[in-house]
Image: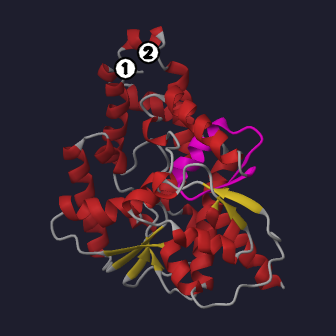
Amino acid sequence: MDINSILHIIAENTLRTGLPLPAPRDIAYHWAKPLNLPRSGSMFLYTGVMYQLMPYIKSFVAILERFEDSRLAKALRLAASPKLTGLARAAIKPERDEIELAESILTSIARLLARAGINYAYLYEDDMYTGVILYDMGLEEAFQEHAARVYERLRRRGAKKLITVDPHTTYMLRHVYPKYVDGFDIEVVNYLELLDEALAGRAQPAPRLWSGERVVVHDPCLYARALKLVKQPRRLLEHAGLTVLEPRRSGRMTYCCGGPIEALSPRLAGRIASTRLRELREKAPVIVTMCPICFVSFSRVAKNETIVDISIILSKTLRQDEEA
């Protein structure tokens, strides 16, 4: 499948449904329904739907990998086919356990924020995808149109401050939206920053769950380079009783997970992910990620490694602390 075909799917679907891939409209907020989070306030949790899209991205990339460089894809010239988006909708079939995992990550984040004493509301149906892939792929007109819609939703809800949960959404709202959206003045803070601030000065609990277990941290490129969010997750993990090990390339010198090009060249993305995974498992078999794209990239090529989102580790520690 050629690049134009892929961009057509992403741009058309984003402008039509608000999501870059065909998926149920309620995937953004389905995870929050059992939590009964408040709907009104001035500070809102904003997921950007990145974690919710993980299973759909993984399924889509698997399809692209099967078609990459195939004679069939070249012959069909799918970019010109009016059935293109319908074809993608029928083919993308995420696994149920992966949907549940994505939702458990968001539930863990919500619990961590509540335990830290942070009062916030949730956007539910107004929790929208930022359009980051449109921006990354150079589809500026489509991105600007979509971003304006996102901001209008946030403005109508009275959002003054947003709590973000992944590097891509944080970067887009903090650095890109102010350049493309007139009047965008919403404060943006990442949940790891909030949790780190909340734990400052607190005594470290006796580590029962992890007992000094060794983990290796993978820094997402945007956290490490653009957002300078490096020390906070390490402090949180150490507070949870883990021994944090560093790979050969970490912090601002971190190495790509391969995710940024997985929609254009899934095989190359897989080779990059495998290279990084080898570096990580040199230190420990438990690999901590903080980004849904990194998680998907590594999970596609992982064999004996354990890939775990930082929120799951922190939430498990919190749960044991509550039960003690």
Q: Is residue 286 magenta?
A: yes
Q: Residues in magenta?
A: 284-307
Total residue callouts: 2
**Closer to the camera in the image, 57 or 266:** 266
Name the residue beneath numbered marker 1: 78
Circle 2 packing at 10 Å, graded few (<14), some (14-19), many (20+), is some
Circle 1 packing at 10 Å, graded few (<14), some (14-19), many (20+), is many
Q: Is residue 263 magenta?
A: no
Q: Position of residue 186 (x, y in %)?
A: 29, 75
User: Left or right: 289 with respect to 258?
Assistant: right
Q: Secondary structure at mark 1?
A: helix
Q: Of the residues shown, which amino acid type is indicated by label 2?
A: Ala
Colour scheme of the rendered structure: secondary structure
Q: Residue at 19% across / 45% down in the picture?
A: 141
Q: Are marks 1 and 2 in contact (CB under 8 Å)?
A: yes
* As drawn, 304 above or below 271: below
Q: Of the residues shown, which amino acid type is indicated by label 1?
A: Leu
* As drawn, 156 above or below 97: below
User: Left or right: 279 with respect to 292?
Assistant: right
Quadrant that contains the N terminus: top left
Q: Residue at 26% across / 57% down in the picture?
A: 147
Q: Secondary structure at mark 2?
A: helix
Name the residue beneath numbered marker 2: 73
User: Left or right: 30 with respect to 323?
Assistant: left
**Closer to the camera in the image, 155 or 279:** 279
Q: Position of residue 30 (x, y in %)?
A: 56, 62
